[in-house]
């Protein structure tokens, strides 16, 4: 972060240095032992808009470290210290941060990425978001959900996305990235922006003016691609929008033919060809119809012989906080263990599911130390558990502990299973037990999930 641009930087190094202010802005701490992180001045709260506390300085000193907020014996936050120094919003956010069970150092992570790693992709998205926020009232978000559903060939939808995002490889866009690139229009010599080559150039005008879409093109004059697209979305039907996009794609295609000396069309042919191509595509879709894949009903399935199956779930509670649920069954469907817990910590869904699995592993170790398959209906979490390498965010702390626990035992694995097969654990996660205590049922299930267990076993409850 201390490197300088230098006297004769390459394009790559210049690009890296241009991103440095953004990278610095997005860097924050992931709390380990808290010894390096200053409470009032550093960025360390992942769910805070600027990663910092919002409470005014209170009883803690100006240079207080986060380590002073942690009970290092129980590996938990000191509730009395949080109560005395932070507002309710900050207390809620701090309590969401997991403290590693094994003491480790604080780590710097990239705060605007789900895995905590900086990438060109995540950096670009943050830069673009900030740029659009800077436009204020002038910025009208594009309804991409509607646009991706338009009846257009996939390659034309990709063109639409590039056009709406102003990333078509026009001369103007290329010259921003490549110093030697020419930004002149191949037809008139003016600066080749998207708006110019697709609409405002005399060459493009000779293509669209005589057509039925001429009025819509003329109304877009002096508007950026994004503004014109938003304007079209608000005033025309999907069919008309498809016609405009197909026309633009054919104009762009013809520009490329001219640019690369490919066979060319007459100017009066371009719009007719665009209309014919769209009609042909619509006819093909109408004849074939959308491909329909029958949805398989997800149900609970019995584990293999000599294997336990642990269904785990987490639920956001109406009264605030999070509920955790666990149901462990054998190859006959008999309940070996059921458990419920309520915690006042209001975790995000993925973090809650991770805590539920870690909690379940502790219970399995004590009450059912047999080979076990853990099933969760949180697909994104299971994908992260399967992922090679570390996850640098707070979620990564829990993922790491889950992996280590399973590795130590050697006879526990996990997999994703749909919500329909996880109904019993879901019911357990909604049980109103005492706060911060685990309620257990060993050998026999609680009455309130009997109907779910019976349904899972095709109407016959095993004895």
Image: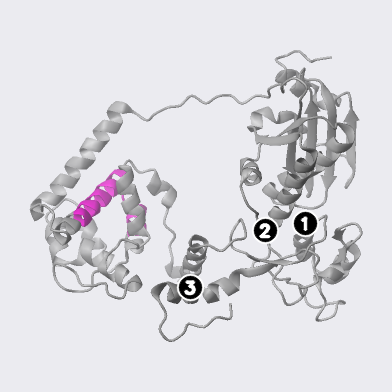
Camera-near label (2 vs 3) is 3
| Residue 430 coordinates in the image, percent (x, y) | 78, 37
| Residue 5 coordinates in the image, percent (x, y) | 48, 82
Side of 277 relative to 85 (left or right): left
Going from N to C along the chain, the mark reached first, 2 or 3, is: 3
The residue that disc 1 covers is 98
Going from N to C along the chain, the mark reached first, 1 or 2, is: 1
In this rendering, is residue 440 above or below 252?
above
In the picture, the disc for residue 393 is 2
In the picture, the disc for residue 16 is 3
Going from N to C along the chain, the mark reached first, 3 or 1, is: 3
- The answer to whether mark 3 and mark 1 are in CB contact below 8 A is no
Is 330 magenta? The answer is no
Which segment is the magenta one?
A: 229-253
In this rendering, is residue 208 above or below 453?
below
Taking the image as drawn, is residue 376 in sight? Answer: no
Question: 59 or 440, which is in the foreground?
Answer: 440
Side of 286 relative to 377 (left or right): left
Q: State how far apart marks 2 and 3 are (Cα).
A: 23 Å
* Crowdedness near tag 1: few (<14), some (14–19) or many (≥20) residues, C-alpha within 10 Å: many
- Looking at the rendered image, the quarter that the N terminus falls into is bottom right
Q: Secondary structure at mark 3?
A: helix
Q: State how far apart marks 1 and 2 are (Cα).
A: 10 Å
Is 248 magenta? The answer is yes
**Rendering quarter of residue 413:** top right
Main SS type for the magenta part? helix
| Residue 103 coordinates in the image, percent (x, y) | 82, 60
């Amino acid at each position: 972060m201390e490197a300088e641009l230098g006297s004769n930087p390459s394009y790559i190094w210049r690009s890296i240095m241009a991103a440095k202010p953004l990278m610095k802005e997005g860097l924050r701490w992931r709390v380990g032992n808290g010894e390096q992180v200053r409470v009032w001045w550093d960025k360390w709260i992942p769910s805070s808009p600027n990663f910092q506390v919002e409470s005014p300085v209170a009883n803690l000193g100006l240079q207080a470290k986060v380590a002073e907020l942690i009970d290092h014996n129980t590996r938990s936050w000191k509730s009395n210290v949080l109560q005395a120094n932070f507002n309710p919003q900050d207390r809620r956010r701090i309590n969401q941060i997991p403290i590693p069970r094994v003491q480790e150092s604080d780590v710097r992570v990239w705060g605007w990425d789900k895995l905590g790693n900086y990438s060109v992709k995540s950096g670009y998205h943050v830069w673009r978001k900030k740029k659009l926020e800077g436009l204020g009232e002038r910025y009208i978000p594009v309804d991409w959900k509607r646009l991706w559903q338009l009846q257009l060939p996939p390659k034309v939808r990709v063109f639409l996305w590039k056009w709406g995002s102003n990333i078509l490889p026009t001369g103007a866009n290329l010259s921003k990235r490549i110093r030697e690139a020419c930004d002149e229009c191949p037809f008139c010599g003016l600066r080749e922006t998207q708006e110019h080559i697709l609409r405002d150039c005399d060459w493009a005008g000779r293509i669209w003016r005589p057509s039925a879409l001429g009025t819509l093109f003329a109304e877009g004059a002096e508007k950026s691609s994004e503004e014109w697209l938003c304007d079209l979305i608000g005033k025309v039907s999907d069919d008309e929008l498809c016609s405009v996009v197909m026309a633009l794609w054919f104009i762009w295609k013809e520009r490329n033919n001219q640019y690369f000396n490919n066979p060319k069309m007459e100017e009066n042919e371009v719009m007719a060809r665009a209309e014919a191509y769209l009609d042909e595509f619509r006819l093909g879709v109408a004849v074939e119809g959308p491909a329909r894949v029958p949805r398989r009903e997800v149900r609970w399935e019995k584990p293999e012989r000599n294997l336990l199956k642990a269904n785990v779930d987490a639920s956001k509670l109406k009264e605030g906080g999070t509920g955790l649920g666990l149901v462990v069954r054998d190859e006959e469907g008999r309940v070996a263990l059921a458990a419920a817990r309520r915690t006042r910590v209001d975790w995000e869904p993925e973090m809650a599911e991770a805590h539920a699995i870690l909690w379940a592993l502790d219970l399995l170790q004590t009450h059912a130390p047999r080979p076990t398959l853990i099933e969760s209906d949180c697909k994104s979490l299971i994908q992260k558990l399967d992922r090679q390498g570390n996850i640098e965010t707070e979620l990564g702390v829990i993922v790491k502990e889950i992996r280590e626990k399973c590795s130590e035992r050697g006879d526990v694995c996990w997999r994703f299973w749909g919500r329909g097969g996880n109904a019993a654990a879901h019911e357990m996660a909604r049980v109103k037990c005492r706060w911060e205590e685990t309620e257990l049922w060993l050998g026999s299930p609680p009455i309130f999930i009997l109907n779910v267990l019976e349904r899972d076993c095709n109407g016959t409850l095993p004895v």
